[in-house]
Amino acid sequence: MKTKNQHIIDLFNQRFTCKKYDKDKIVLKEDFETIIEVARLSPSSFGYEPWKFILLNNQKIKDQIRPYSWGGHAALDGASHFVLILARTAPDMQPDSKYIEHIHNNVQNYPKDMVAGRQKRYGDFLDKDFKINESARSVFDWTSKQAYIPLTSMMLTAAALGIDSTPIEGFNQDEVHKILVSNGVYDPNHFKVAVMVSFGYGEPAKRFKMRQTLNEVFTEIN
Ligand SMILES: Cc1cc2nc3c(=O)[nH]c(=O)nc-3n(C[C@H](O)[C@H](O)[C@H](O)COP(=O)(O)O)c2cc1C
């Protein structure tokens, strides 16, 4: 019988980036709901969840972004589900923004008398500890960094459900952003596309894991 540990290693060995989808195989509704739910449950810095997930079904918009998405052709052509992962822009992430206020008050239920202290700690983190507030770009890079956490949760959950996935960074971010905004997909004051991911069933392919050895990537300091 396999150990729990071996089950986990097998799951990670079985997840591959899908390079060609079988168009006719559709991900079940309940499976996609599970994939989105694990995204929602993913952890984030300060618990501020600086992301949004959009299931893009609109073929016209998919056709428009295709020429600027060189790494996403297989996904756009054949995947059952195509998801945009958006990250929040700099104004939303400021300690006194409406968005952070919403998270404090309605999600984290912070006691009113503790909000100012929390804002101060977060402001210092942004300005001094990680210097995230150096530019709008550095804030967006930080929120994007976090958007990759749900990305990973989603892909591994898909693998556990026997569903293939493709993480997609192979696109021109500014061009794709412009197209999505011009189609009213999201408000650029609050979001920009950080990364994309697709789900479906791949056509059988010979695949093997190419990775550095454990010694190359792991060290123990005593
Ligand atoms: C953030 C990120 C972006 C990626 N972008 C693309 C992409 O645009 N197109 C693609 O086919 N693969 C993309 N990949 C897949 C990687 O090339 C792949 O994960 C890597 O070669 C390891 O292979 P494996 O996922 O099959 O184990 C991306 C992977 C990650 C993590």
Image (spheres, rainbow, N blue to C red):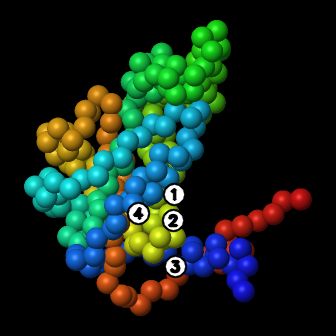
Q: Which residue is mark 1?
A: 153
- Mark 4 or 1: the one toward you: 4
Residue projecting furthest to the top: 113
Q: Which residue is mark 2?
A: 156
- From where the camera sits, is residue 81 visible? yes
Q: Earlier in the sequence, mark 4 or mark 1?
A: 4
Residue 162 lies in what quarter of the image?
A: bottom left
Q: Nearer the viewer, residue 191 or 43?
A: 43
- Residue 109, compared with residue 174, is above or below; it is above
Q: Residues within 10 Å of mark 1 (few under 14, many from 20)?
A: many
Q: Position of residue 141 (x, y in %)?
A: 44, 42
Residue projecting furthest to the bottom: 206
Identify which amino acid the numbered label 1 is placed on: Ser
Tags 2 and 1 touching, CB below 8 Å? yes
Identify which amino acid the numbered label 2 is placed on: Leu
Residue 222 lies in what quarter of the image?
A: bottom right
Q: Which residue is mark 4?
A: 31
Residue projecting furthest to the left: 60
Q: Residues within 10 Å of mark 4 (few under 14, many from 20)?
A: some
Q: Position of residue 11 (x, y in %)?
A: 57, 75
Q: Which residue is mark 3?
A: 14
